[in-house]
């Protein structure tokens, strides 16, 4: 990939809906240094046993097997991925795979400034930073931590070390940050980052989701257009989760409307947890253990066949099924707290959000 030579990509495996296996989100840890209300609001959780966590060599090997089936995009996630020691080394390993065309990372930004240069030097392509508010007290209330200045410094370091394509992910919630849509867009202009507003999702169970907290795509566009004027929808062929829009001055932003306008029919993403569980959908309640066959010494061809056969029978459309409940019985808690405590994989932070 680095030599500039053309790469012939393998044939993409497709599921029962014709969706290709193309994008893999890799969680490198289930731990986080924040306690955001919409993700992991409790101080203590049942953590994945450290001895079960995949080594970087195992992650790279599994990624190679996924790329044999069509994966060409990887996103490194957590928890908070920068809590995993020397994660830049994993980036270097992944860059050795000529089929992987894009490696991105989603981080809360707290530790980013001290690691940005190493990540850039290792070959990471893009960085997405979660940023839900610009107000220190509001940030502290949401995250139970007083580290907003560190996040701002992390964002500043992205451009300073040479990254381009910065994205800022904002979970929008009524009663919390609906008054900051415009300030966040203006901040994005300052730091040359594209803001992506994300509708509050009801994954996991500890986040106490309710429909009246969801600030919808329609409501977001109304606020933005009332301030800036005509907002143009950017027409593009993409399986990316965000629909993109353009302001009159040319600034672009995105909206990920998984709650009110699910896009399951074009979803090509799956998730690999830090301990090797493979989930075909963010809403999936069960996954496939790939660590076990890997550590048992099963051949690369055997594990590739497992990946292919599982994806080919994939029928997951979790966001659409949750949406349909609005017309039937309502959207209550997705997973009971007692069940969450028994299986840490069921929380969003364990599977990369």
Image: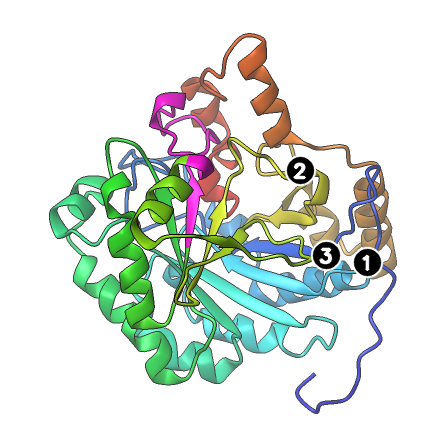
| Residue at the (69%, 57%) spot, across then down | 237
Q: Quadrant of residue 11?
A: bottom right
Dots 2, 3 in contact, CB < 8 A: no
| Residue 198 magenta-highlighted | yes
Please determine whether, in this image, residue 266 is positioned above or below residue 300: above
Q: Secondary structure at mark 3?
A: loop
Q: In the shown orientation, is residue 137 left or right of residue 134?
A: left
Q: Main secondary structure of the magenta part?
A: loop
| Residue 148 magenta-highlighted | no
Q: CA distance from mark 3 to mark 1?
A: 8 Å
Q: In the shown orientation, is residue 186 left or right of residue 261?
A: left
Q: Quadrant of residue 190?
A: bottom left
The answer to which of marks 2 and 3 sits earlier in the sequence is: 3
The answer to which of marks 1 and 2 sits earlier in the sequence is: 1
Dots 3, 1 in contact, CB < 8 A: no
The mark lying in front, picked from 2 and 3, is 2
Q: In the shown orientation, is residue 27 left or right of residue 133?
A: right
- Judging by the rendered image, the residue that carries numbered circle 1 is 69
Of 215 and 65, which appears nearest the observer?
215
Q: Secondary structure at mark 2?
A: helix
Is disc 1 surrounded by few (<14), some (14 to 19) or many (20+) residues within 10 Å? many
Q: Quadrant of residue 194?
A: bottom left
Q: In the shown orientation, is residue 47 left or right of residue 265?
A: left
Question: What range of the chain is rendered magenta?
Answer: 196-218
Please determine whether, in this image, residue 224 is positioned above or below residue 259: below
Question: x and y percent of residue 91 in the render?
Answer: 54, 73
Q: Secondary structure at mark 1?
A: loop
Question: x and y percent of residue 213 in the render?
Answer: 34, 27
- Judging by the rendered image, the residue that carries numbered circle 2 is 264
- Judging by the rendered image, the residue that carries numbered circle 3 is 22
Dots 1, 2 in contact, CB < 8 A: no
């Amino acid at each position: 990939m680095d030599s500039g030579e053309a790469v012939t990509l393998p044939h993409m495996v497709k599921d029962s809906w014709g969706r290709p296996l193309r994008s893999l989100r890799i969680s490198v840890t289930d731990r986080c240094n924040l306690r955001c209300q919409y993700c992991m609001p409790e101080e203590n959780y049942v953590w994945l046993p450290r001895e079960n966590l995949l080594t970087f060599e195992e992650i790279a090997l599994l990624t190679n097997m996924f790329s044999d089936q069509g994966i060409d995009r990887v996103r490194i996630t957590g928890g908070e991925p920068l809590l995993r020691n020397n994660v830049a080394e994993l980036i270097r390993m992944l860059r050795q795979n000529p089929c992987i065309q894009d490696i991105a990372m989603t981080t809360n930004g707290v530790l980013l400034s001290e690691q940005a240069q190493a990540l850039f030097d290792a070959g990471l392509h893009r960085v997405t930073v979660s940023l839900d508010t610009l107000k220190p007290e509001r940030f502290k209330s949401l995250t139970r931590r007083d580290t907003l200045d560190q996040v701002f410094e992390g964002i500043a370091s992205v451009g300073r070390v040479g990254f381009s394509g910065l994205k800022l992910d904002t979970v929008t919630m009524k009663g919390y940050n609906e008054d900051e849509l415009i300030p966040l867009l203006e901040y994005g202009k300052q730091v040359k980052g594209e803001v992506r507003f994300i509708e509050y999702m009801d994954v996991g169970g500890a986040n106490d989701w309710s429909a009246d907290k969801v600030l919808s795509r329609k409501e977001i566009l109304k606020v933005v257009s009332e301030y800036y004027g005509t907002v143009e929808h950017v027409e593009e062929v993409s399986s990316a989760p965000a629909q993109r829009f353009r302001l009159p001055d040319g600034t672009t932003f995105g909206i990920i409307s998984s709650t009110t306008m699910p896009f399951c029919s074009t979803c090509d993403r799956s998730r690999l947890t830090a301990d090797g569980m493979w989930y075909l959908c963010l809403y999936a309640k069960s996954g496939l253990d790939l660590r076990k066959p890997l550590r048992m010494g099963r051949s690369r061809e055997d594990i590739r066949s497992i990946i292919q056969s599982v994806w080919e029978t994939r029928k997951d459309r979790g966001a659409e099924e949750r949406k349909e409940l609005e017309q039937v019985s309502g959207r209550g808690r997705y997973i009971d707290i007692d069940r969450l405590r028994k299986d840490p994989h069921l929380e969003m932070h364990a599977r990369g959000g």
